Image: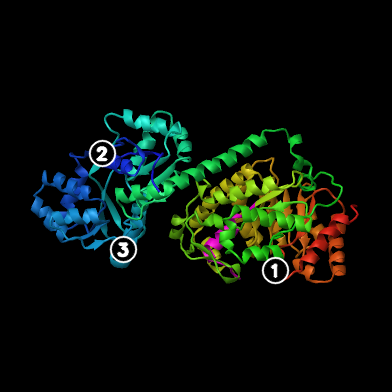
Amino acid sequence: MSLAGLHVAAFESRRGSEMERLIARHGGTPHVTPSMQEVPLEENRQAVDFAHRLITAEIDVVIFLTGVGAETLTRIVEQHLDRDRFLSALADTTTIARGPKPVAALKTLGIEPTYRAESPHTWREILQLVDAHVPLAGQTVGLQEYGISNPSLIAGLEARGAHVLPIPVYRWELPSDTGPLEENIRNIIDGKIDVALFTSANQVNNLLTLAENNGQLDALRAALQQVVVASIGPTTSDYLRERRLSVDLEAGIHKMGQLVSMAKEQASVLRDRKQKLASILSAAVRSEKEPSAERPWENSLLLRACRREPVTRTPIWLMRQAGRYMREYREIRAKTSFLELCKNPPLCAEVAITAAERLGVDAAIIFSDLLPILEPMGLELTYGQGEGPVIHNPVREGEDVQRVLALENIDALHYVMETVQITRAQMPDTMPLIGFAGAPFTLASYSIEGGGSRNYLHTKTLMYRDPAAWAALMERLVQSIALYLNAQIAAGVQVVQIFDSWVGCLSCDDYRKYVLPYSRQLISALPAKTPVIHFATGNPALYPHLAEAGGDVIGIDWRTRLDTAWESLGSDQGIMGNLDPTILLASKENIDAAAGDILQQAAGRPGHIFNLGHGILPQIPVENVIHLVETVKTAAHQ
């Protein structure tokens, strides 16, 4: 692989020529423009005050974040105080170096740092180090800063009882001549840049600042979504994400050569993926501009029921209609893992369409799973034996929420959008396609529990003990799920279902306090013209509250009668359900009776979609599922 044919932007100042040579050596066309100039704070009273307090033993710990900062601080201090006294006091104080550069700078000054933060040398590693070795309660901590303050580090130190004394030693200003940087911004906005390399948070800050000054910030942000963004390390990546910019690549070693080499290996594939995804979504947007009459699925039984319009018969589709109970699915699964299948769009389309055709249902649902969205959000997901999901780095404490990333684009989930596109293209035009996602609470529960749970102990502990962390987690999930579902809609689904499969563990009061606002926010972020099925299981008392949160149709389980649930929802609400899946293990006579009872409860009212109260079980004979579909489709519509 190489950078051949790719235009690569970088924002180096001191090492611009070196970066330009690296890009060219790997075949890329470099667009390297300085983004900042280092301006020492020579008249720096804060630094001098710090030095006085250090000499008089008022400082307990000093944290050095950069090598240049350690050297610059010493130069500033020696203009006002005796250099040897300052360095002697520093040698007698507990010192923490963030990485190899401050270690080297301190050694040059004759100081051996007391502690060194582990790789990848971010503020998180500093906090882990002090937790292990340096009690901070009641301590005064001098924090050498560089350019931009790190509020997360300061807040973490203060949360551990420290009094933090920031020591700014220099600032990063825009270059004296901003013309080249402005040209690079225009190149990005005009789509002339394929890859953008960032080696510091200050570069990001100055790029965005200049764009904002010139009224180009929104255009730059939008354009960067189509560019492969590569970061030199976690600190720069964190800052990019704080500014709502996605990171496509992150160097494992904090070196320019490693960054460019990594871009060489992966940027071309990522650029092509971004372009393909943009093509899928733009094609769907163009299609949506066609008159509704030109889209046959608009008059389908399912969409009419979602709009609570009269239908000639009750529409039916089934949750998990493509699954292990079906031979065709098992044959495919024998050749691939579950997660690999979810990331193979042609196979996903085959599985979904085969199931819909074999059963004769009125809609297809994309083949995917609730949890892959959590991978690009920073959670490590695998599926164990029996296809049970396991999250290996669950969110257990409030501070763990900080590593859950809100999605800024759906590049990492490109395979789902490709699945939507392929499935839609291979289906009959008259049949609607359903997309789906997990609800905020259910995804939060998976993220916290790390897998299945009977009592949701960890979820409720975080929810009750740390409402601020719970709110932060739910807000990140809402942002990500809304982006994900809107992309599915843009790619070609006609209906979306939101699965709150685990919310039945909550009381009504807890649902209203901890869940309803976020579910409502999510549903409000979806297009009003796209029907939303809001499904939950486990606690029938929650259904009126689900309806309050939103949704054109409320999906219910078998633990309540359909007519009772519909009465609690109101006549202006559609309803989906609600056959107990285990009925399909019984005789066909039992299936006919149970299905007939549900249809009788619905009484032909507009807005009913027949479904199970949960997914089809693996043990159920496919013949019984087909029989159920035929029974519902041939039943007299009252």
Q: Amino acid at mark 2?
A: Ser
The residue tagged 2 is 17
Tag 2 or tag 3, which sits nearer the N-term?
2
Q: Would residue 238 be seen by someone viewing this image from the given angle?
A: no
Residue 404 position in % (x across, y down): 47, 55
513 above or below 45? below
Cβ atoms under marks 1 and 2 closer than 8 Å: no
Q: What amino acid is at disc 3? A: Leu
Q: Can you identify the residue that label 3 sits on?
A: 129
Depth check: give the residue in front, 76 or 225: 225
Q: Earlier in the sequence, mark 1 or mark 2?
A: 2
Q: Which residue is mark 1?
A: 618
Mark 3: few/some/many CA within 10 Å (<14, 14-19, 20+): some
User: Residue 508 appears at what percent x and percent y?
Assistant: 66, 59
Question: Magenta residues?
Answer: 436-454
Nearer the observer: mark 1 or 3; the answer is: 1
Q: Which mark is drawn over residue 326?
A: none
